[in-house]
Image (cartoon, helix red, strand yellow):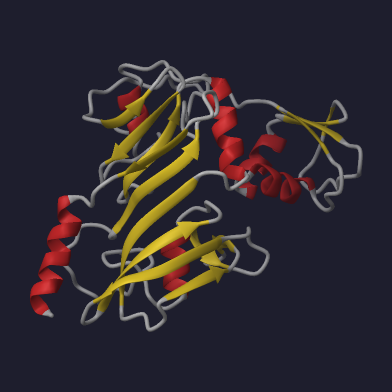
Amino acid sequence: MKLEIKDEQGRIDVVLSKMLDESRSKIQRKIKDGKVLVNNKKTSCNYQVSIGDIIDIFKEEVDNKLEKKEIPIDIVFEDENLLIINKQSGLVVHPAPGHLNDTLVNALLVDYPLTDDLLRPGIVHRLDKDTSGLMLVAKNEEAKEALSMMLKKKEVKRTYLALVEGVIKENRGTIDAPIGRDPKDRLKMKVVSGGKEAVTHFSVIKRYHNKTLIECVLDTGRTHQIRVHMAYLGHPLAGDSVYGPKKVITKLSGQCLHAGEIGFVHPRTNEYLHFTSPLPDYFTDFLAELERKQ
């Protein structure tokens, strides 16, 4: 990948982190491994970029070969360029420490060669392990590049349903708060000054005694965005053991978050595609229980 610095300023690791939407630590590792060149020369993490700099970024080599694994997948649409997957809660999307061979990627490789990105073949965006719902998967590099650009330009409509703790008084609202790594816990994300732009729009669907069902539409796609933003608002997701209050006890095994709708213009056919996915049983069962207690 080749990039040209046009008006960006600052340390190269910070600049590339924002340009590529990757963590700063990942960019720093690439720089230290010699995978980043500035004007055809190796650089350091504290290099201050200048207008006109040409930056080459090389793919990281991966030693371990991903294994194929038979895992049931609900495919709601498929053509020669892309797939729409209805991911089940509890399934990790791509391999990572602790989940190297039991992910959506491993399952997809059984029937699809996908793209040549060894760690995230075909994945243009992801859902958390305990988030269910619709996902885009590219079947070739051209489709992956086009879909990734559409997401960056906010040309893909993604709508989520979430059940949050407490009763939200406003009928609708927008959370515009930057998200970055939690300085006290690097495994978590947090609303922080200097974080990446993150915008979530929400509207109330139904209020219960001590919970609220909402619809969320994203302008951006930051890691854990809805979970972090709703916790920041004081209404963490029901069942969220990471961002929710530790003393709240529910019968849920994970957070109530479902990617229920996706719409976009097909990058090859220019046809507008729109898909919806019903709530999974564990979600509807919990809502039914809340209804009975009203």
Q: Is 256 located above or below residue 56 in the figure?
A: below
Residue 103: image location, x then y, percent = 32, 33
Q: Nearer the viewer, residue 260 or 245?
A: 260
Name the residue: 29% across, 32% down.
Answer: 76
Where's the N terminus, which quadrant?
top right
Q: Quadrant of residue 53?
A: top right
Q: Is 41 located above or below residue 110 in the figure?
A: below
Q: Is 263 located above or below residue 163 in the figure?
A: above
Name the residue: 33% across, 32% down.
Answer: 104
Q: Nearer the viewer, residue 6 or 13?
A: 6
Q: Nearer the viewer, residue 13 or 261?
A: 261
Q: Which residue ends up furthest to the front in the rendered image? A: 271
Residue 277 in sight in this render: yes
Name the residue: 59% across, 29% down.
Answer: 145
Residue 251 in sight in this render: no
Q: Which residue ends up furthest to the left in the rendered image? A: 292
Where's the C terminus, which quadrant?
bottom left
Residue 261: image location, x then y, percent = 37, 48
Residue 230: image location, x then y, percent = 42, 70
How many numbered marks, from 0 up?
0
Name the residue: 16% across, 58% down.
Answer: 284
Residue 207: image location, x then y, percent = 27, 77
Left or right: residue 130 versus residue 64 is: left
Left or right: residue 170 versus residue 192 is: left
